[in-house]
Amino acid sequence: MAVKRSLGYKVLLFLAVSALLLFTLFPFVQILSTSLKHQVDWGNPSLIPTVVNFEAYKELLGLTSQEVELPETIKIMLQNPAISEEQRAAIIEKFKSNADIFPFGRYTLNTFLLSMATALISTALATFAAYSLARLDYRGRSIFSNTVMFVYMVGGVLLMVPLYQMAVGIGLAGHITGTLVSLLLIYVVQTLPVAIYMLGNYFRTIPKSLEEAAMIDGYSRIEAIFTIIIPLSRPMLLTVMFYCFVIAWNEYLFASVFLKQYHDFHTLPLALQTLFSSKNAIWDRIMAASMLTLLPVLIAFTLANRYIASGGTAGGVKE
Amino acid sequence: MAEVRLKQLVKRYDKQEIIKGIDLHVQDGEFVVLVGPSGCGKSTTLRMIAGLEDINAGTIEIAGRAVNDLQPHLRNIAMVFQNYALYPHKTVKDNILFGLRKSKVSRAVMDDRLKQVATMLQLEELLNRKPADLSGGQRQRVAMGRALVRDADVFLFDEPLSNLDAKLRHHMRTEIARIHQNLKTTFIYVTHDQVEAMTLGDRVVVMWDGEIEQMGTPMDIYLNPVNTFVATFIGSPSMNLIPATYRESNGMIVMADLELPMELLPGVHTANLKDKQALYVGIRPDFFEDVHYASELEAYWKLPERTIELIEPLGFDKEVSFSIGDQFVKARLDLRSDLQAGNALGLAVNPERILVFDRDNGMRVN
Ligand SMILES: Nc1ncnc2c1ncn2[C@@H]1O[C@H](COP(=O)(O)OP(=O)(O)OP(=O)(O)O)[C@@H](O)[C@H]1O
Ligand SMILES: [Mg+2]
C-alpha cells in the first residue's frame, strides 16, 4: 500500500490537515487556556497564561487546603456562649467547605451513573432488537424497523413538554426515583434507534452460516447468539455503548426540565449551565469544569478505541 | 445411526419451486452422494435435512421420526458447510471441540477424539491457530474435523473437497471413504464433481433443476443413464450423442453416412419407434475399440473407416476425435493405438454399450 507521492502533495496534505485540526481543536485549547489563567490574565489574548494557575481545578476537585477566612460577623457570632460546640463546628465546617460552591464530584458521579445505566440498558436492548431485524423473519418486522427510525427523526425539543406532562401524569415526576427512571427511559429511547441501526448493520456482516454451524453443533439460537454473535460483535458493541454513554453524558435538554428541582441530582451539563449563571460565574472555574467534563469522555474513548480496533470476522467463511 | 427419508419434499422461494417434490430413502449407514450442476438444489436439500431451511411441503424423517418442525440443534446431525463456516474468534482446537463441549462428553473422550481427528486430517500443527491464519485447504480440513469429531446420527457434507488441490483432494477422498467404512454411519454427500460421486457413493443421486433424474449405484448410472442429461453429466469425457433417424423400411438407425442395424440392439422395441423418428445414439468414448487390437469382435458394431481429425494425449490414454456427419465424436483409445492425425481409423463398439435416446424428450428408448 506504499503509494509514492510528490513532495508538493505531501506539503499540501500536511497544511490541509493542520488547518482542519486547528479549526476543530481551537475551542478546546481556548477552554484549557482560560481554565489555567489567573483572574488578572483574562484580558490577555495570548493562549499561554502568564502564570499557570491550578486553583480552579483544585477548588472543583476539593483539593484546596488554604484556610478560609471567617468573616468578622461570624467570628463574633461564634463567641456567643449560647451556641453549643457541635453547632459551632458545623458552622465553621459550612464556611470552610467548598462543596456548596460547586460539588463537582457529586455531579460527576450523578452523570456517570446515569450515562452508564443508559449505555448498558440501551446496548442490551439494541442487541436483541437488532438481531431480530437482521436475522429473523416475522410479521411486522418492517413496521417495527420504520417506527424505530421515525422515533429518531423526531427532535427532542418537540417531545420535551409532552413527556414531562406524561411523567407528571403517571406520578413519576413527583419524587426523585421516578424522575431518574423517566430520565433513564428517555435516554434509552433516544439512543436506541441509532444503536439498533449500527448493530443491525454489523450483524448483517456476520455470515449466517456461523450461527447455523453453531446450531448444527447442538446450540440453540439463543445460545448461538451468546457464544458466536456477541463475541464477534464486541468491537461494535463497545462502539455502541460508547455512543450511548456520550449522548447521555452530554444531554442537557431533558435533564434541565426533569431535574430542575433536585439540585443534588444535577448532571454535569446542567450544573455547568447553572454555574454560568450563578454568582460563582468565574471564568477560570467554568472553563476548568468544562475541561473536567470532557476528560472522562476522552479517557473512555481512548480505552474503547483499543478494543474497537481489534476483533473482526475474517477467515470464517469462504468469500 | 439413522435412516433418512424424504417424502415429496418441496421448497419454494417467492413462489418459485426450487425443490420440486423429491423422494429419497437413505438407508441406515449408507453413503449417498447428491450430484448435479450448480444451482440444481443440492445444498438446499441438504440444508432442509439439517433443519436450516423451512420445508414448504412434504416430510423429512430421521430414524423414523418426522423432523419437519424439529430445530437443527435437536436433530443430532453433523454438517460440513460449503463455505467452511468456521468460528473466526476460536482456535482450530476450539472450533473442533465446540460441539462436544455442548454434548458434555468427558474431557478424556474429548482429548482422544481431538487427537484422532487431528491426526487423520493433518491438523496437529494448527490446533492453536485462528481460522484467519489458515489456507483455504486447511480451513476446509478444520471444517471436516469439526463434523467428524461428533458422534452424530447423520453426517452431511456440502462439497467438502472443493477447495483442495488435486493431490490433497485425492487423499481426502480416500480418507472419507475409509472414515465411512469405520463409522458405518449415514453419510449424505453433495458434490458437483462426478469423480467424487462415482468413487465415494454406495448410491448416487443425480439432480437437475430441483428434481431427481436418477438414482442408483455408480455403475448403474454410468452404464444405464435414463436420459441424455444423466448420460452427458456423468462420465468424463462426456458421452457422445450422435443425431440419428430411425428408418423403418430397412430396420436401421441412420447417422449421416452410418447405419446401425436394429438387430444389434435387442433392447429397443421397434414397436415403440415411428418411421423417421429423431433419435440420439449415445456411445461413451471409453467404449470404442481399435479394431487392430481388440479381439472377439464378432458381435460388435463395426464403423466404416473414419479419418482422425485430432489427437489429445492424456497420459496412458489418448483422445481421438473424428466426425460422423456434422457431429464431432471422441474415442478414448490406449497407447497401443499408434495413430496420427489424418490416419484412417477402424473402430468397433459393443452393442450392449450403445444407448438410444428420443431426441425430443431426451428419454432412453432401449
Ligand atoms: N435464499 C434464497 N432465495 C432465493 N433463491 C434461492 C435462495 N437460496 C437458494 N436459492 C436458489 O435455489 C437454487 C438452488 O440453490 P442451491 O444452493 O441448493 O444450489 P446447489 O445445487 O447447491 O448449487 P452449487 O453447486 O452452486 O452449490 C438456486 O437456483 C438458487 O438461486
Ligand atoms: Mg451448493
Image: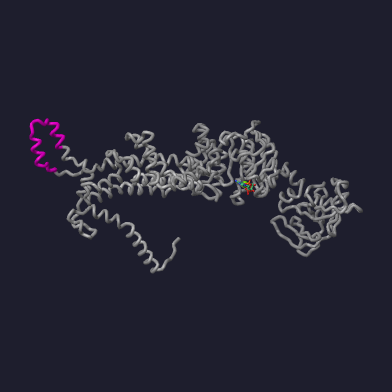
Q: In the image, is residue A73 part of the stretch drawn in magenta? A: yes
The residue segment tinted magenta is A67-92
Residue B284 at x, y percent in the picture:
76, 52
In this rendering, would B184 be left or right of A222? right
Q: Please determine whether, in this image, residue A36 is positioned above or below residue A98.
A: below
Identify which residue, A52 or B89, lies in the foreground.
A52
Q: Please determine whether, in this image, residue B172 is positioned above or below residue B67.
A: below
Identify which residue, A86 or B43, lies in the foreground.
A86
Q: In the image, is residue A167 part of the stretch drawn in magenta? A: no
Q: Residue at x 14, y 37 (%)?
A: A92
Residue B7 at x, y percent in the picture:
69, 36
Residue B314 at x, y percent in the picture:
69, 57
Residue A212 seen: no
Identify which residue, B308 or A307, lies in the foreground.
A307
In this rendering, would B58 be left or right of A37? right
Residue A58 at x, y percent in the picture:
21, 46
Identify which residue, B206 or A79, lies in the foreground.
A79
Q: Residue at x 67, y 44 (%)?
A: B17
Residue B219 image-quadrant placement: top right
Residue A35 seen: yes
